Image (tube, grey):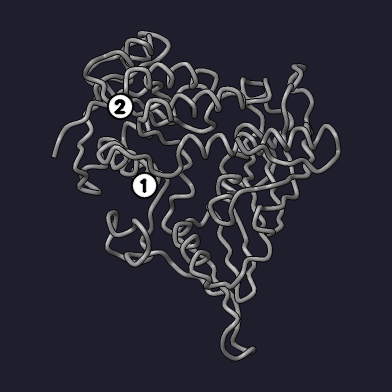
Amino acid sequence: MADIGIGIVGGGYMGKAHAVAMQAVGAVFDTPLRPVLEVVCATTETSAERYRAAFGFRRAVTDWQALVEDPQVQAVVIASPQETHREIALAAFALGKPVFCEKPLGATVEDAKAMVVAAQASGCPNMIGFNYVRTPATQYARALIAEGRIGAVTWFRGEHTEDFYADPEAPATWRTTGRANGTMGDLSPHMINAARALIGPIAQVNAQITSVHTERGGVPVTNDDQAQMMCRFENGVTGHLFFSRIATGRKMGYAYEVHGTKGAIRFDQEDQNALWLYTAEGAQAERGFRKILTGPAHPDYLAFCQGPGHGTGYQDQIIIEARDFLQAVHNGQTIWPTFAEGLAVHQTIAAAWISNEKGTWQTVAQD
């Protein structure tokens, strides 16, 4: 075993999740690299010191450049606002340091392209934080589809729906300002990533993007509340995606349905330890979806719990991400999902915006 110094830029919601994951991953997965929380960066000295003390970092700074340049920081985790991602990642790659970056990869397609180019030029391991695709249930769904258990896929439906802005009287915040903070920038990346992971690259989209509540408390809302799009995958499969932050009653509606010639799969993140499988086998009178509870026989479950049906949670997804990132660093090779996946998701979103503006099908760029 060897220690690896970790620096995390950002100590908020995701910064805390990654700090906890780095502390736990060695015990959960017995990783050959054991993270040491060296430096945390926040915008003020007060918050930086609070995060340091709460999460167990050795040092705290308010300048991300100091974190990246610290000789004890051997890998960088970016959990700060998306408009900061590009500059931090490029600085880390220039010093030969691996980078894990939260989604979305950058604030724009241009940011994402620059980050991919820098990652490839540096040769450093790089990874983007699409955590939901790592649940044991969704990993199992990917395996079932890949091995042809439900036959040839014919259709896909996916959604990422939440209701944190369902109340029209909810006040305006940073989330209601700027395209990057709207539903297409915030929620859609996860389900677009899921669609790509389960079915394959998306070739074309036809989208409608809507701002339902155009002001909050007298303050104009400058981004979108919800969106939907038809899509055509490169392999010929068709589908539909829906994203919303005003879906009343939905708390974590990362859900999908996959139809095939021999069966079908359903999943809902609000019940993340269950996968519903239908197979066109046996007597017609006995056919139907059956609920499969995840357990030690499913990917990455046993490391957390020996009991079938006992379940894993949100933080466990982040620990699995940490395992994957450390494995990439240890082997000196990237592991999916890399920055290139983040760029592909960005390009799908960009095509959706153009489609919404022109009212036509748009081809997704493949750079």
Q: 155 or 305: nearer the eye?
A: 155
Query: Looking at the image, is mark 2 or mark 1 earlier in the sequence?
Result: 2
Q: Is residue 19 left or right of residue 209?
A: left
For this orientation, the residue located farthest to the left is 1
Where is residue 95? Give x, y as percent: 32, 18
Q: Nearer the viewer, mark 2 or mark 1?
A: 2
Where does label 2 land, which residue? 75
Residue 307 x/y as whole percent? 30, 65
Residue found at x 26% / y 14%: 70
Q: Quick one: quadrant of the N terminus?
A: top left
The location of residue 317, given as percent across then percent down, is: 40, 46
Quadrant (top left/top right/bottom left/bottom right) for the C terminus: top right
Question: Gap between marks 2 and 1, in whole Å?
Answer: 21 Å
134 displayed left or right of 214: left
Q: Is residue 148 left or right of residue 365?
A: left
From what the image shows, is residue 87 above or below residue 246?
Answer: above
Three-letter code, disc 2: Ala
Q: Which mark is residue 96?
A: none
Circle 1 residue: 316
Element marked by disc 2:
strand
Nearest the camera: 321 or 361? Answer: 361
